[in-house]
Amino acid sequence: MPRKLIKKYMPNEEKLKQNKHLSWLGSHIHEPNLWHLNRKSVSRAFLVGLFCAFLPIPLQMLVAAILAIVIRSNLPISVGLVWITNPLTMPPIFYFTYVVGDFLIGEPGQSIEFEMTMEWLQNSISTIWWPLLFGSIICGIFFGLLGYFSVQGFWAWHVGRSWKQRGDKREP
């Protein structure tokens, strides 16, 4: 895996450990796998980060940080991947998860007139919450596992290719 590229954009480990907002994590933040860039911690980070990105809840980054600590994945990558759902991508992603949830539950598609207002959201949440939540969890699991296995495969391929290139350089 291109460690140098990832390290270039990762925050400084020592600064994060001394951050006052992360002090509630105590000694858990000193776990080495939260900071190492190896196949296990990075692939787990993709699992956690992508799963949490699909959760239609506030404080997704906090959930990702807690899950990263529990399963010992790379903390900065886990939290950073949550930003896949940002204010620009949130509407299409959550609409997609709603459609998936509606399809999997088997309810006939309801014609919903979407409006970008809090009043519409408050009135419609009782109709859309279950398909949205179910679809979000299913998509989160699917894309999290896809990310996990993709990183595992890419990492193994990259290491194999590097070893082959080293062997080719040694041969006369």
Image: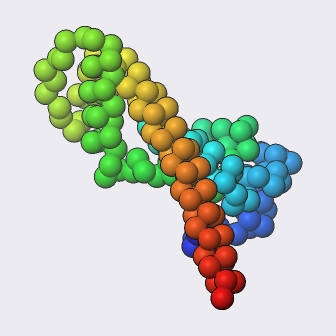
Residue 126 x/y as whole percent: 32, 16
**Front one among 139 and 83:** 139
Residue 143 location, quadrant: top left
Residue furthest to the front in view is 172
Please say whether residue 84 is visible from this viewpoint.
Answer: yes
**Front one among 143 and 29:** 143
Residue 79, placed above or below residue 97: below
Residue 74 left/right relative to 56: right
Residue 89 left/right relative to 159: left
Residue 55, placed above or below residue 156: above
Please say whether residue 66 is visible from this viewpoint.
Answer: no
**Front one among 172 and 77:** 172
Residue 17 left/right relative to 126: right
Residue 31 x/y as whole percent: 82, 51
Residue 123 x/y as whole percent: 26, 20
Residue furthest to the right in view is 27
**Front one among 61 and 170:** 170
Residue 70, placed above or below residue 150: above
Residue 87 left/right relative to 65: left
Residue 71 x/y as whole percent: 71, 39
Q: Which residue is rendered at x = 60% and y = 38% of the image?
A: 63
Q: Which residue is rendered at x = 78% and y = 67% of the image?
A: 14
Q: Quadrant of the N terminus?
A: bottom right
Residue furthest to the top in view is 107
Q: Quadrant of the C terminus?
A: bottom right
Q: Tally the numbered discs.
A: 0
Residue furthest to the bottom in view is 172
Q: Which residue is rendered at x = 49% and y = 32% of the image?
A: 141
Looking at the image, what colour scheme do you see?
rainbow
